[in-house]
Image: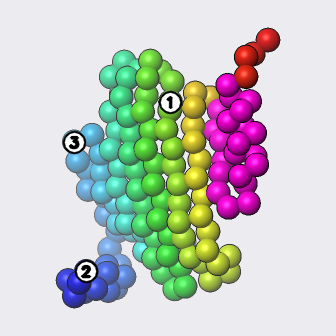
Amino acid sequence: MRFYLVLLVSLNLCIAQFNIPLPFGNIVLNKNEKGDLEIGGGQSLNLFGWGGSRDFKLTSGNGTFKIDKTDKVLVNGTTFGGDGSFGIDEKRGIDVGQNVTIGNQTLIGGPGKESNFLEGLINLFKPQH
C-alpha cells in the first residue's frame, strides 16, 4: 500500500508528459489544461473490420478523481461494447456514467437516465419498417 501512495504522490509531482508506444497500444502520462494528472492507456486491433479496442484513463487533481474505461469489439465493421466512468469532482460531486454501443446507436445510462436507457434498449430491438 505504501508503494502505491509513493507512486501516486510522485506522479502528481511529475511535470513531464510522455506517450509510450506499445505494440497495438500505448501508455500516456500528461497534465490536462486544468493541471490535473492524466494517466491512460489503450489497446486496439482492426483486421479487415474485425477486432477490438480497450482504453482507460485515470484523472487525479485538486478535488478531482475520475476513472474512464472503454471496451469495444469490432465485428464485421460494426462496433459493439460499452464505456463507463466513475468520478468525484469538487463542483459536480459524484459522477457515474455508462454507455452501451450497438452498431450505430449509443445508449446513454447512469443515475437519473434509467428510463432513457431502457427506452433506447427497447427501441433497438423493435422491428424497423
Lower sequence index among marks 3 and 2? 2
Quadrant in the picture for the C terminus? top right
Q: How far across and down, in percent of the image, does residue 106 sit? A: 64, 38
- Is there CB contact under 8 Å for labels 3 and 1? no
Residue 21 lies, with reference to residue 67, above or below; the image says: above
Residue 112 screen position, x and y as percent:
73, 60
**Viewer-nearest of discs 3 and 2:** 2
Please state which of residues 95 and 41 is positioned toward the viewer in this rendering.
95
The residue identified by callout 3 is: 23
* Relative side of 46 to 88, left or right: left
x, y percent for residue 19:
31, 58
- Residue 93 appearing in the image: yes
| Image quarter of the N terminus | bottom left
Three-letter code for the amino acid on which mark 3 is drawn: Pro
**In this picture, which residue range is highlighted in magenta?**
105-125
Q: Which residue is at 30% across, 57% downward?
A: 27
Give percent across and percent down for residue 86: 53, 66
Residue lying furthest right: 129
Q: Which mark is residue 114?
A: none
Q: Is 31 included in the stretch rendered in magenta? A: no
Residue 105 or residue 60, whichever sits in front: 105
- Label 2 is placed on what type of residue? Tyr
- Residue drawn where x is 47% and y is 21% of the image: 77
Q: Secondary structure at mark 2?
A: helix
User: Is 58 placed left or right of 9 in the picture?
Assistant: right
Q: Quadrant of residue 54?
A: top left
96 lies above or below 90: above
In the image shown, does 79 or 125 lie closer to the viewer?
A: 125
Q: Which residue is mark 1?
A: 79
Q: Name the element at disc 1.
A: strand
